[in-house]
Every structure is written in C-alpha cells, then in structure tokens.
Amino acid sequence: MLTGEKVRLRAYKKEDISLAQELLNEPDIRLNLAVPVPFPFTLEDEEKWYSGLTAMKDTYNFAIEDLETGLYLGGCGINAVDWKNSHATVGIFIGQEAYLGRGYGTDAMRVLVDFIFNEMNLNKIILNVFSFNERAVKSYKKCGFSVEGTHRQELFRGGRYHDNLHMGLLRSEWAARKETK
C-alpha cells in the first residue's frame, strides 16, 4: 500500500468491482474516460478486467481509498511502461462525487508519481487529458505536469470535437519541486 496525505493506493479487491462499475458509468466520469465511445461498462466487463489484473504485463493498477474512512474512491495506474526509454503512461479517475475537487485526485497522483520515480526508477511520466476536463488539467499542473502538445480536435464528444492534451513530467522536475517544499 502507498499512502499520501488523503488517500491510500492499494491493490483492487473483489468487493471493489461492483462499485467500480457503478462509478465508471456515472455520466461525468464516462465523459472523461479515454474510451472510443462512452458506452456503459457491464458488471461482466469489470469482472473480466479484474480477473486480468497482474503486474506481469507492465501495467500496475491501484484502487484509491480515503485514508480516513477506507471508502473506495476510484482508481489510478500505470497503463504502459517503456523500460528502454524509461517512461510510463498513467491514468486516474475519482468517481465519488463528494470527493471531486477536494484534492483527493491530486494526492493520489502525487503518490503514484513518487512510486514511479522512486520505486520503478523511470525518468518520465506521460498522460493524456481532454481539454474540457479543466479540473484534471489543474490537478496535473499542481503535480508538476506540463502540456507538451495538443492533439487538435482529436476527440468527438457531445456533438463537438475537442482537443486532447499530451502532458509530461520529468524526474528532474519532480525532484526540484520536492526540494523547494
């Protein structure tokens, strides 16, 4: 388990599956997920995903729980690792509405970033975020990520085209931020 100021990152449990499926199907959450078409996940989809969890595929998934209550809030993880070039691609979601915009996602991302740089010894972390997800962009910037590129009108949601922002964080930038705190 990895612990931050507000959250704990832990392994997924079988009892998380139904709540994860419910949270992932919330309209505001689905809107921000990198799925081709925001079609609802079934319980069977989540069970299949859970049964395939393993750290042997260069993917590492963590459940996010509130440090005080133990409530499952969402998930984060490393979706791909490029060991040769020393970088990882990450993703995160907080699904409990009462916890949105209160620093839980930022804390979870900071814990994940620390794990990647200090335990996996990688040099760079990459993520993609849709331009309309302003709360996430603000959170990632708080963690030290910078916009490295904009994939213009790459996503079609809600009857309109939107930009996809490519963000990155280097180990040296993370270390410099930690030294100034």
Image: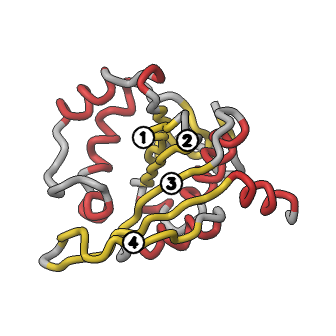
Checking the image for residue 79, the label placed there is: 1
Pair 1/4: label in front: 1
Mark 1: few/some/many CA within 10 Å (<14, 14-19, 20+): some
Q: Is residue 84 visible?
A: yes
The residue beneath circle 3 is: 126
Give whichever of 57, 114 is nearer the camera: 57
The residue beneath circle 2 is: 85
Q: Is residue 80 left or right of residue 119?
A: left
Among the 4 quarters of the image, the one containing residue 38: bottom left
Q: Is residue 89 left or right of residue 151?
A: right
Q: Is residue 174 left or right of residue 143?
A: right
State whether residue 24 is above or below residue 181.
Answer: above
Among the 4 quarters of the image, the one containing residue 45: top left
Sequence order check: which comes first, mark 4 or mark 2? Answer: 2
State whether residue 33 is above or below residue 155.
Answer: above
Q: Is residue 59 left or right of residue 181?
A: left
Q: Please state which amino acid type lies under the numbered disc 2.
A: Asn
Sequence order check: which comes first, mark 1 or mark 3? Answer: 1
Q: Secondary structure at mark 2?
A: loop
